[in-house]
Amino acid sequence: MRFKEIPGHEKTKSHLINEVKKNRVSHAQMFIGPSGVGKLPLAMAFSQFLLCENPKRGDSCGECQSCKQAAGFNHPDIHYVFPIVKSAKDKVSISDDRKKEWIEKIQKDPFFDLHGWLHHLDELGKNPQIGVDESKSINQKLALKAYSNKYKIMIIWLPELMNNQAANKLLKLLEEPPEKTLFLLVSDQQDKLLPTIISRTQFLKVNALDTETIEKYLVKHNRIEADVAHSIAGLSQGNLVEAIQFAQGNKEAHVLFELFVRLMRTAYAANALDLISISEELAMLDRETQRSFLKYGMHIFRESIILNYLKGDLINLRNEERSFLDKFARFINNKNIYELMDEFNTAHYQIGRNANAKILFTDLTIKLTKLVKKGV
């Protein structure tokens, strides 16, 4: 992975490159920020740059033996630790037991989150972790001399999923790291890490991506029309992974739009049979589409408020969405926006926790009959 392959984050890339030039690379760095913004690819690109035999001014060369090994995931000095679902039956207890699947996932798409990783493993709904067995594996790898005579690099993805035993053993390594060893921790939730681990790492804040960067990426890599990419970029709120998932799962971008329009019209009409019908239709969708739908609803509510109070500025909408909002937005105002956002956000969270979809969407549609009219 090279820096140029990662969209946005130019200041972060420059910071990392300057660390190397000034010989101020910390032995333990924490890439911290929202999920889905490209923290893991940044850590991978940084590793490749550190070990590159002929680094360029702002990137690794991509051509030397070290770069080729890094790109092929067979560099002897770059190691990965990531959450796995332990299984005595399948003999899975450490990251190396899922190394093949890990490489397959990153080579297919380096921008993914925990949900995408579990989906790739066909283990959605299970509880992944980094266990104490991983600590023994880390010690064994770091005990070896650096092959490149530069650094041994340990990339730990989602260290917040370490159990207590593993976290305490990692703490000892951070306190007394082996010679020429670098730890790159990539975290979505620093509040779930041991305070002592946090105190022994140098923080690197990785922010959400801007709308224009995501829009350009989708047009180039997902081959979708500019107006669709613009709408998806606004919907994703800086999360590239969600934007990619939305683009891949909704080649016809009007699918969620049509569902949302029907739900709002049904809620306003308050016809019992139609309410049951739309709630059952939503309940039959797969969970990822349900989550996308609920997030899409929050996006439309936000844009309605912007249209109402900012007279159309900063609207991230396609033409059909804008035409709908010209009539619909007046129903979304300070009388109901907070409750609407709360209901959709709660439903989004509960779907992620495997709530009963039929009960959830039935309850949501009933509540919408009151909330939509509350804004009149």
Image: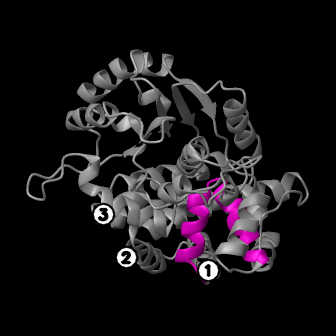
- Say whether residue 24 is visible: yes
Q: Which mark is residue 243?
A: none
Q: Residue at x 61, y 61 (%)?
A: 63
Residue 257 in the magenta stretch? The answer is no
The residue that disc 1 covers is 258
Residue 242 in the magenta stretch? The answer is yes
Q: Residue at x 40, y 54 (%)?
A: 352
Q: Amino acid at mark 3?
A: Leu
Of the 4 image quadrants, the one containing the N terminus is bottom right
Looking at the rendered image, the disc whose residue lies closer to the viewer, 3 or 1, is 3
Question: Which numbered disc flags the more N-terminal residue, 2 or 1?
Answer: 1
Q: Position of residue 92 (x, y in %)?
A: 18, 52
Q: Which colouring convention does the figure follow?
A: one colour
- In this orientation, which residue lies closer to the viewer: 207 or 45? 45
**What span is colored magenta in the figure?**
226-251
Q: Residues within 10 Å of mark 1 (few under 14, many from 20)?
A: few
